[in-house]
Image: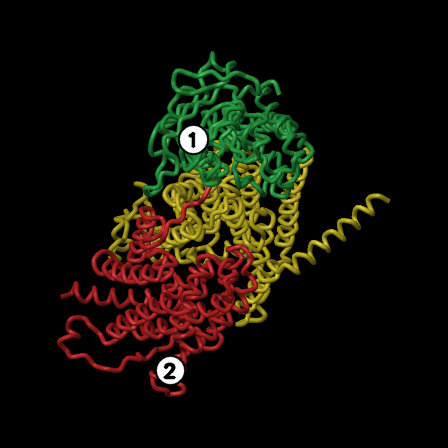
Amino acid sequence: MSQQKTRMVPLPSEGIIPERDAGSMPVLECRHLGIEFGGLKAVDDFNLTVGKTEIAGLIGPNGAGKTTIFNLLTKVYQPTHGTILFDGKETSGMNTVQVNRAGIARTFQNIRLFSTLSVEDNVKIGLQGSMSYSALTGILRLPGYWKNEKRMHERALELLSIFDMQDLANHIAGSLPYGAQRRLEIVRALATSPKLLLLDEPAAGMNPSETAELMSNIRKIRDTFQIAVLLIEHDMKLVMGICEGIAVLNYGRLIAKGTPEEIQKNPVVIEAYLGKQKGADA
Amino acid sequence: MKGLKKTMRVDFATYIGVTVAFVVMYLLQLGGHLSNSLSGQMVPICCFVSMAVSLNLVVGISGELSLGHAGFMSVGAFSGVIAGMSLADVIPSVPVRLAIALVVGAFFAAIAGFIVGVPVLRLRGDYLAIVTLAFGQIIKDLINCLIVGYDSHGLHIVFNVSGLKSVTDLHLEEGGKAIIKGAQGAVGVTKMASFPAGYILVMITLIIVLNMVRSSTGRSIMAIRDNRIAAESVGINVTKYKLIAFVSSAALAGAAGALYGLNYGSLVSSRFDFNTSILILVYVVLGGLGNIWGSVIGATVLYILPEMLRSFSNYRMLIYAVVLILVMLLTNNEQFKQWRENMAEKLGRGKRAEGGV
Amino acid sequence: MVFFSYLISGISLGSVYAIIALGYTMVYGIAKMLNFAHGDVIMVGGYVCYCALSYLHLPAIVSVPLAMIACTVLGVVIEGLAYRPLRQAGSLAVLITAIGVSYFLQNGAQLIWSATPKNFASVVHFDLPSSLTSLGLSSEAIVTVGACIVIMIALTTFVNKTKLGKAMRCCSEDKGAAQIMGINVNRTISMTFAIGSALAAVAGVLLCSAYPTLQPTTGSMPGIKAFTAAVFGGIGSIPGAFLGGLLLGVIEAMAKAYISTNLANTIVFAVLIIVLLVRPTGLLGKYAPEKV
C-alpha cells in the first residue's frame, strides 16, 4: 500500500507523474487527442501523461469514451486530432501491429481470446514477436524451430505462473471460466513484452476475493516488469487501491486529474457520477 | 509437454495410416487384385486428398471460405503438363521430369495464388468467397484461350482472345509439337503419374501442412481466424499470415494438379470448374474443418462413394446428394452430438477401466 | 444501331439475372446463407412450365403460374427440410447442404426429364411491328424487362409497406430481437423462400423463352451469375440486386460483342472483383464495422 502515498509531481508539459518516474521520460503522453465519428466528438482534447512505472486509472461513467481512448492508443481507430507520444516517439503513422511492437499491449472489455487454441498457445502467440522463426524453419523443423519452441514453452509457463495458471496450459482458452479468461488476456498481453499495459475493465465479473488478488497481481506485474499500467475500471475499490494517478472522463472530455485522494474529493467528479444534486447547497 | 505429445501422436498416426493404406493398395494393385476402374482411381484419389488437405489450410485453419481451389489445380495441371511434355528431350528420366513438373505446377499456382490473394484477402466472409469463385472462373476461361507448343527453339505461346486462332498460329517448325490447343485443352499428354508418386505427393502435402499448423506460422494463422482484432493487438501481421496460408495452399493444389494432369492422355480446363472446387470443399467440410486427417478420409471416401454406388446406375448421384444432406443434418443435430459425446465418454471410461486392471 | 441491339439483349439478359438475384438477395438478407440451390429452382420452374405447355397443352397464362406455385412449394419444402434444422449451425454446413440440394435437384431432373435438352417454346406470343424488330427488339425482351420492373416495384412496396415485409426486414437486422417482438421468425424465413422461389420460376420461364434449350444444368451458370450480380449490387439490398443484375447483363453482352466471346465471363467477373476492391460491400451494400 506504500505506492498510494507516492507524491505526484507536475511535468513541464502539463502532465503529472509519480515522483520516482520524474527523472525519466514519461512512457505515454497524449496531447489534445480527439476523434470524431461523423461530427460526433467521441473524445475531445484529451491530455494525459503516464510515468514509466506508473499505475494509472481511467474512470468515468458508461459511454464516456474510455475504451475509445484505448482504441486510439492502439490504433484500432486513427485519431482525428492531437498526437500520441509513446516512449518519446510519435505514433501517428503506425497501425495496431506496429504500436504493439513499439510496446503497447492491451486487453479487451469484451474478452477476445483465441478461443479454440490452448492457453499455452495463446501466450505463445504473444511471444512470437520476440522469439520468432521463419515459416520455412517451422515446416522443415530446422534447429531454430526446436530451440524457439522450447524457449516459448518455458517462457509461456513462466508468465502463466504469475496468475498461478501454469496447470491450465493445455486447456482450451474458450473453455476457461470467465475470471481465468480475463487473467489469460493479461498474460497474453504481457507476453509481447510491453512497456505500457492497457487493461480494459480487468475486474469485470470477478468476485471481491478475485479482485483483491488481481490488485496485488497488477502491482506485482508492475514491480517485476518495471512497466506502466493504464487501466479502465468501474470497481472504485480497485482503482482507488492501486492507481497512483487517475484521470476522469465524461462525455469524451477530461474533467479531472489527480491522485486518488484528490479525485475522491473533487466536486466535479462527484457530480459526474451522482448527477447534480439540486438544493444540496441551499 | 503433454499437448505437444498429443498433436505429435495424431500427426504420426496420420502418416502411418496413409502409408499403410498405400502399401496395402499398392500390393493389391501389383498383384492384380484391383478392378481396372479402382486401380485407375489411385492417382486421382491421391490428388484429391492433397487438394482437400491444402484447401483445409485455407478454409479450416485460416477460416476463409474459398470457392476457387480448382482454379489453382488447373494452373498447376496445365503448367505441369507443359513442363512435363516440353522437357522430354532434355530430361529423359520420367520420375525426375515428373518431379520437376510438380514443382513447376506448384510454382505457377503459387504465383496465381499470390496475385489472387493480395487483393482478395482484404475482403471478408462471403465477399471473399464470391471473389475466389470469380477467380476460379477467370482462370478456367483464360486457360481456354491458351495455345501452347514447343519445338527446338523452345516454347511457343499464343493467346487466343478472338477465338479465331489455332495451332498453326504457333508457327512451329518441323518436328514441333502442340501441347495445349485452346478450348480442346491438352492432348497427347504422356502419362507419367504413378501411384507411388501420388503417395509421395500426399505425404509431402501432409508434412508441410501439419508442420506449418504446429509451428508459430500456423498458430498465427489460427489466431487470426479466432480473433483478428486480438491478433493484431499482439503484433501479428494479418495480411502476411493470411497470404502465407493462401499461397501455400495454392502451391500444394498446383502440385496436385500437375500430377493429375500427367495422369491422363488429354485434359480440358472445364475439368477444373466451380463444381470441382465445390466437390473439394465438400470433402473438407465433411472431413471436419481444421481436421487434417479428416480431410484425407473425407476425400478418399467421398471420391470412391460415387463409384461404389455405380450399381445404382442413374440413381447414384441422387443418392450421393441425399447422403450429403443427411450427413450435414445429422452432424449438426444437437441430440446426435449429445449422443456421440455420451458414447465417446462411455468408451473412454471403458478403456480407462481396462487400463487400470 | 448494332450497339442498340446489343444494349437491348444486355438489358434483357440483365433483367433475368436481376430477377434471380432478387431471390438470392432476399434469402441472403434474412437467412444469411448462400443458397446455391437457387439456380436449380430456376431449372425446375422451366421444366414444370415446359411440361404444362407441351404435355398438358395448357396456355401460357396457366402454365407460368403453375410453375410459380410448384417452385414456391419446392422452395418452402427445401427450406423446411434441409435448411431449418441447420439454423444454429455454421454457415459452411448450410452451404454444403445447399450444394447437396443442388445436386439432388439436378440429378432428380435428369432422372425425370433425361439429360437431353428440351426445346422450350417461348411463352410470349405477340408480334412486334417490323420497325421495332429491326432495332433488335424482341417481344421476349420487352416482356422480360417489363416483368423485371414490375417485380422490382412490387417487391420494394411489399418489403417497405406490408406487415410481412417489415417482419422480413426485422429478421434480417436481428433475429433474436424480432422473435422477442413477437415475429414468427421461422414463418418469415419460409415466406422469403416462397417469394424467392416463385421469382426463380418466373426467371426460369423467361430465360428459357429467350434461350430455348432446357436441360438439368440450365440453372447453374445463370445461378452463379445472378449470385455475382447480387454481390455486385450489395448482397441483401433489393435495389442493389436489380442494379447489379442489369449491369452484369449489359457488361456481358457488350464484352461478347466488342471484346471477346471467349472472355465475356472473365470480363464480367473481373469487373465484379474491381468493384468489390473499391467498395468491399458492393455498389449499394451497407458497411458495418466490427465493434471493439
The residue type indicated by label 1 comes to: Ile
The secondary structure type at the circle numbered 2 is helix
Q: Colour of chain A?
A: green
Q: Residue farthest to the bottom?
A: C57
User: How busy is the neighbourhood of tag 1: few (under 14 within 10 Å), some, or many (20 plus)?
Assistant: some
Where is residue B141? Give x, y as percent. 34, 55
Is C67 located above or below residue A49 in the figure?
Answer: below
**Residue A138 versus residue B49: which sits nearer the camera?**
A138
The residue type indicated by label 2 comes to: Ser
**Residue C114, quarter of picture:** bottom left
Camera-side mark, 1 or 2? 1
**Residue A195 versus residue C132: which sits nearer the camera?**
A195
Label 1 belongs to which residue? A255
User: At 31% across and 80% down in the image, what residue appears?
Assistant: C123
User: How busy is the neighbourhood of tag 2: few (under 14 within 10 Å), some, or many (20 plus)?
Assistant: many
The secondary structure type at the circle numbered 1 is strand
